[in-house]
Image (cartoon, grey):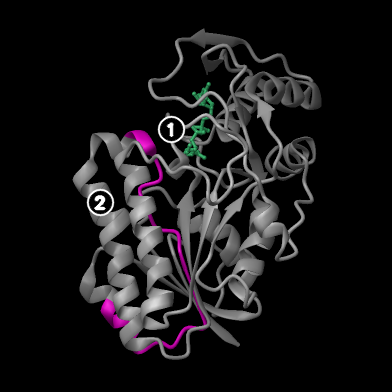
Amino acid sequence: MDKILITGGAGFIGSSLANKLYQTNKLVIIDDLSMGNQDNLPESENIEFIVGCVTDHNLMKRVLSENQFTYIYHFAAIASVADSVARPLETHRINFDSVFNLLELSKQYQQGLKRLVFASSAAVYGDEPTLPKKEESVIKPLTPYAIDKFAAEKYVLAYSQLYNVPTSAVRFFNVYGPKQNPNSPYSGVISIILDRLKRKQAGEEISFTMFGNGEQSRDFVYVEDVMNALELVAKSDKSLGEVYNVATGTETTLNELVRLLSESLEIQLPIDYQESREGDIEHSLADISKIKELGFNPEYSVGAGLNDCIKKGFS
Ligand code: UD2
């Protein structure tokens, strides 16, 4: 059995990966439960769950020096761009320093490591309007979140070149799926719409707040497809020292999302239109030809992914 470290493993993407891997691997999961939830994880003797923060050097040193991992997935982060603007220093400690520390500890202690995969973000492209985004498109990080993700990503890839720590990075676009926490105003928009629909169905007087006219679009990628992308990136020789967009290469407007969900559930969700959010990007779309070269082929259209969410979350 491989031993795998997942930081942020009680969060949305980390716990989805843990659920996929735990039956055939030994997992060590570190999460400070700031956004994650231990209930996202199954009870299993294959999972060692550590409540702690990736900024705790002593904890990380103990974990990295006492275990030999085959794969490391680093998802722990302040995941909200707005939060990073409010708390730049703390964001930097969590989203940058922890990565640097992990790289150093991996260099020192992880001689058998096959791959460290770092979760970066489409935020690194900023608001430069040319679409679709290729990995080598103009980078324009505009917020502490994006700056730290980009800097960390660069270090991650440089450690592969300079010190033979086997690394790869992924730039997630808008990932959605069951287990996504809808409780922050900066939660993923699909989790928020699903939450409002659920509450409306339960009889609550509730509306969805649309920031802008709903014609903004995103490249929404279903978490099941993200799991396949992560496996390909972690296991391919070609991906060593490389960064990949993780998306579907298709764009969907918010209006389209609301329409698809309302039709599937036969619920009319009242929309409360508000001013656009400051700094909101109008359109975001990935070019996924690079990850397709590894064999990636997204299986879920937005309609199929949303139906799967409904099946899993509305039972
Ligand atoms: C996503 C990522 C973010 C960062 C960014 C990079 C998520 C959850 N966030 O932010 O971490 O990587 O991409 O560009 O994936 N909206 C509403 N009503 C709501 C909530 C959102 O209208 O209640 C709008 C929002 O103004 C935006 C769109 O929905 O136009 C998508 O918002 P989001 O927060 O899901 O994701 P995004 O693209 O801002």
Amino acid at pointer 1: Tyr
**Earlier sequence position, callout 1 versus callout 2:** 2
**Vertically, is 158 above or below 177?**
below
Q: Residues within 10 Å of mark 1 (few under 14, many from 20)?
A: some
* Image position, residue 245 (x, y; %): 58, 52
Residue located at (35% from left, 36% from top) = 142
Q: Is residue 217 magenta?
A: no
Pointer 1: what residue?
Answer: 186
Quarter residue 225 falls in: bottom right
Q: Is residue 175 left or right of residue 56?
A: right
**Vertically, is 162 above or below 222?**
below
Check the picture and name the quadrant holding the C terminus.
Answer: top right
Residue stretch rendered in magenta on the structure: 61-82
- Asked whether mark 1 and ligand 1 are closer than 8 Å, the reply comes as yes
Q: How many marks?
A: 2
Q: Is residue 99 left or right of residue 128?
A: left
* Image position, residue 75 (x, y; %): 45, 59
Pointer 2: what residue?
Answer: 92
Q: Is residue 179 visible?
A: yes
**Vertically, is 242 above or below 82?**
below
Circles 1 and 2: CB atoms closer than 8 Å:
no
- Secondary structure of the residue carrying tag 1 is loop
- Secondary structure of the residue carrying tag 2 is helix
Residue located at (27% from left, 48% from top) = 91
Amino acid at pointer 2: His
Residue located at (79% from left, 20% from top) = 266
Front: mark 1 or 2 = 2
